[in-house]
Image: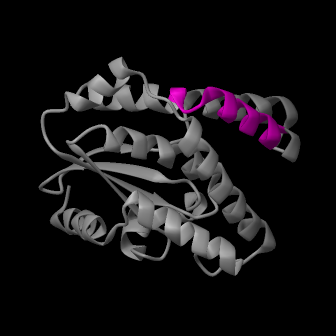
């Protein structure tokens, strides 16, 4: 990893928000009928509002088993989990409360969140123009070395999307509703399972 990228990550960590700050900013956007970035479309504003309500719901319902939390608590060195996201991205709304629950239960993990436009260089480095709406989790050590990059759409959800697209040609509103129902039933389990697979080899 180049020193330039390392500096970008370190700058993102220093300027990133904690979970409470992020939720506060998200609620402020909702109250103003806005989203981040220049695309103030009605659809994205509606998604921002929906995601604020999803986070409130998931905050109350997410549950992580003690044996799963022990995996994270056994991490030997301090890590910073830096999340890059859009306010209107539903995958971020599903994942961030889970990240927060893990971080709150694990002294070695610090959660930091960067919304779009807060650090354009970091966004451009890790999110291409075609996938700017997909959040990325950058896991680094205290020195800013990048340990892992993870996209919070669970493998099982990604497979569901691909299977539906293969059968019907595109992801439509019907499927989006079905996927959201699945996310609600899943309760963050698949996200935690993938995070455990991610941190176990470290």
Q: Position of residue 160 (x, y in %)?
A: 70, 29
Q: Residue at x 70, y 63 (%)?
A: 49
Magenta stretch? 175-190
Q: Where is 120 relative to 54, above or below?
A: below
Q: Position of residue 110 (x, y in %)?
A: 27, 51
- The chief SS type of the magenta part is helix
Q: Position of residue 156 (x, y in %)?
A: 60, 26
Q: Residue at x 80, y 34 (%)?
A: 178
Q: Nearer the viewer, residue 124 or 180?
A: 180
Q: Where is 127 relative to 158, above or below?
A: below
Q: Nearer the viewer, residue 86 or 112?
A: 112
Specify whether residue 29 is in view. Answer: yes
Q: Position of residue 141 (x, y in %)?
A: 17, 49
Total numbered badges shown on the rendered structure = 0
Q: Nearer the viewer, residue 32 or 176?
A: 32
Q: Residue at x 71, y 57 (%)?
A: 50
Q: Nearer the viewer, residue 75 or 127?
A: 75
Q: In the rendered view, does 137 fall on the left or right side of 39? A: left
Q: Which residue is the extreme one toward the top?
A: 67
- Quick one: quadrant of the N terminus? bottom left
Q: Where is 79 relative to 113, above or below?
A: above
């Amino acid at each position: 990893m180049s020193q330039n990228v390392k500096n970008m990550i370190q700058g993102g960590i220093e300027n990133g928000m904690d979970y409470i700050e992020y939720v506060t900013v998200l609620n402020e956007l909702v109250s103003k009928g806005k989203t981040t970035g220049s695309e103030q479309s009605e659809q994205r504003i509606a998604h921002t509002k929906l995601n604020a309500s999803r986070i409130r719901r998931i905050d109350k319902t997410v549950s992580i088993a003690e044996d799963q939390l022990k995996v994270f608590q056994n991490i030997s060195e301090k890590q910073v989990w830096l999340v890059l996201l859009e306010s209107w991205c539903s995958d971020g709304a599903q994942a961030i409360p889970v990240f927060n629950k893990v971080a709150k239960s694990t002294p070695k993990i610090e959660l930091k969140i960067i919304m779009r436009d807060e650090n354009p260089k970091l966004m451009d480095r890790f999110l291409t123009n075609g996938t700017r709406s997909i959040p990325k989790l950058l896991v680094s050590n205290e020195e800013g070395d990048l340990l892992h990059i993870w996209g919070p759409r669970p493998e099982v959800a990604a497979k569901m999307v691909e299977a539906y697209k293969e059968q019907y040609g595109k992801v439509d509103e019907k499927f989006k509703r079905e996927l959201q129902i699945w996310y609600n039933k899943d309760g963050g389990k698949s996200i935690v399972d993938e995070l455990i697979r991610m941190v176990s080899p470290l």
